[in-house]
Image (tube, rainbow, N blue to C red):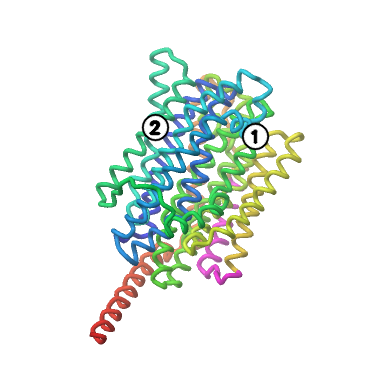
Amino acid sequence: MKRFSIIKAAATAGVATLMSRILGFMRDVMIAASLGAGPLADIFVVAFRLPNLFRRLFAEGAFNAAFVPVFAKRMEAEGVDAARKLSAEVLAVLLAGLIVFTLLAEWYMPYLVHALAGGFRATPEKFDLAVTYSRITFPYLVFMSLLSLYAAMLNASGRFAVAAFAPVLLNVVLIGALVLAAMMGRDSLASLIWGVAIAGVVQFLMVWFAVKQAGLGIRLQRPRLTEDVKRVLTLGIPGVLAAGVGQINLLVGTNIASAQNGAASWLYYADRLYQLPLGVIGIALSIALLPDLSRRLKAGDEAGARNSQNRSLQIAILFSIPCAVGLYLLADPVIAVLFQRGAFSVADTTATGVALMGFAIGLPAFIGIKVLQPSFFARENTFYPFIYGALGVVANIAISLTFFPIYGHVAIAIATSIAGWLTLVTMSVHLFISGWRPDRALVFGTLAILFSAVLMAVVLYNSPFAPPEGEPNQTVSLALWLGGHILAGTVLFLFSALVTGALGRDLLGNFKSLDRASRLAKSNALRDKADENEKDD
């Protein structure tokens, strides 16, 4: 089995995610200019979000939580052939289930659209178009779910690059669709919808080829509910909610927001911005941490597992806190520079900026959840994350329904953040009771990070330079102003972090030393086992 370090794996996934998000911002800038934040943008958001919602719930969420630990342990204990056999059995059942589910979804699409955006019913033309376009995009779920299986195989075997870069192709295809629509004078919305369907096929083929090249290729077979498949399904059912809390909260928010014209689009654009650090930091660490913890626990390396968890959490806090501060304080300028052009108005910037501030409050919690989940999943425990995720969903629904009539879409963003913090706190308490303890480096590192972030916030909030207004080249001037403030805040935070010890020298070294110790321990264990076999002979 190919060995890997968490830092290298997370960096690979993080760089790929960063590339994807940069292209995603280019895509969203073009979408904002073409569709604005009105009815057409709302339709695209719903048609694009439906297959992605189920993908993240059933494929990336529940499937990864259930499949990766079982696959990694099987490969660790029995080798590649046994792991491939498991994958083939899971693939057969997964594909059969996806085909049936997709056919049912196509038939009942009006009900799914109503569940996601019930407010569209008030405008029949808008609702009907959303149903039609959702039927075109929904097969995207099939290809992306199959991609998740192959990506999980690559990740569990220590190969992160190809699966991490696959989402880049989605943005390349959608940008290409918008460019072609502009050049040929075609409908931008229709071009985007068909682009989503094509992108699913392209991404899947890329990862399928990588799996074949890695010697992990599997063939289709008749679906059978073997004991291994039943084990994966048993773990996956509660994992639907455990790993998809953010998506369920987003579903709730989109449904409620659909009653306010433009709200779904404002939340979508704000969501895209806070998803950048969430993907680069939280999801990247989660992807790298799950197979590492599974491997360490299989080898009996509890100390190494605890250290990996603490160091990953420390890195998450190091990046998430200053990102949250920056997004909160610079929300309006960021939105204006990225999206305010064409059909996207000043009023849209203000509405989206307030939503981004609401999401920024919960960003550290969203990232923390991603980093803590592998501790449960690596132990094949998806039940308790399900319970804590359910508490967050209930809180989100209650707060959103209570305050949406008063504060509009802002209430949804804040409710999502509160739900995230509730889920993080309950997960942390459970792990603490189960024996996990934040070590000294994590505690003092967190305090130093908080101090540095507060210092950065005070300086940015009291900046003597006001954002430029009413200038001929206001977008360029605002971009320069924003870039200067981001640079100043980053330099100040890093300087303070170095002085206070937030960037401890042992942060990366602990990963390397633990990995060396783990390999040595396993080598000794294998040698001892060989000696015992010789004695038996």
Q: Position of residue 388 (x, y in %)?
A: 62, 56
Q: Where is residue 28 in the image (x, y as percent from the top left)?
A: 48, 29
Q: In which quarter of the image is the C terminus?
A: bottom left
Q: What residue type is labelled 1?
A: Asn
- Which element is circle 2 on? helix
Count the numbered circles shown.
2
Q: Is 86 in the magenta?
A: no
Give the left or right position of residue 430, taking residue 290 as reference: right
Residue 479's disc number: none
Return the residue nearer the eye: 430 or 380.
380
- Which element is circle 1 on? helix
The reply to whether residue 471 is in sight is yes
Q: Which residue sits furthest bottom?
A: 535
Q: Where is residue 100 in the image (x, y as percent from the top left)?
A: 48, 38
- In whole angstroms, how far apart are the C-alphas of marks 1 and 2? 26 Å
Return the residue nearer the eye: 46 or 372.
46
Judging by the rendered image, the residue that carries numbered circle 2 is 199
Judging by the rendered image, the residue that carries numbered circle 1 is 255
